Amino acid sequence: MNLNEFIKATFRDKQQNPSGRELTVFAFVLIVIASWIGEQFFGKHIPQWMFVAFISLIAAGIGLYTFEKPKTEDDK
């Protein structure tokens, strides 16, 4: 599996369709990592409410993914 196939597979839902939720969660993870780097190395402070909001959105995206049921042939 090459890198391009890996990235495409990462952002697919349980029905193997491209999913905006996975992209959104990934974007928020990048934002949290960037804010941590900014805080640790450059002294740029992010408000606590903003950090908590990003973490909450990540948790909601991951949590909702676990409750999503795969569609069966009868549902289509």
Image: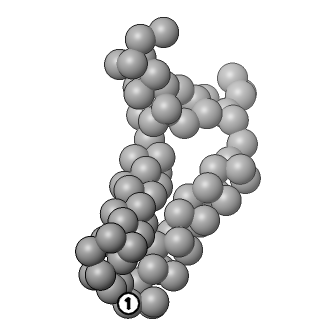
Quadrant including the C terminus = top right
Residue 19 position in % (x across, y down):
44, 41
At x 71%, y 50%, the residue is: 66
The reply to whether residue 20 is visible in this rendering is no
At x 45%, y 89%, the residue is: 48
Residue 63 position in % (x across, y down):
67, 59
Residue at numbered disc 1: 47
The answer to whether 33 is drawn above or below residue 71 in the figure is below
Q: Give the amino acid type for the residue marked by disc 1 in the picture.
A: Pro
Residue 49 position in % (x across, y down):
45, 90
At x 59%, y 66%, the residue is: 60
Relative placement, left or right, of 62 versus 49 is right
- Helix, strand, or loop for circle 1? loop
The answer to whether 14 is drawn above or below residue 56 in the figure is above
Crowding at mark 1 (Cα within 10 Å: few <14, some 14-19, many 20+): few
Residue 22 position in % (x across, y down):
47, 46
Q: How many marks?
A: 1
Classify residue 7 by image quadrant. Answer: top left
Classify residue 69 by image quadrant. Answer: top right
- Color scheme of the displayed model: one colour
Q: Nearer the viewer, residue 75 or 34?
A: 34
Q: Nearer the viewer, residue 28 or 45?
A: 45
At x 28%, y 81%, the residue is: 44
Q: Nearer the viewer, residue 23 or 40?
A: 40
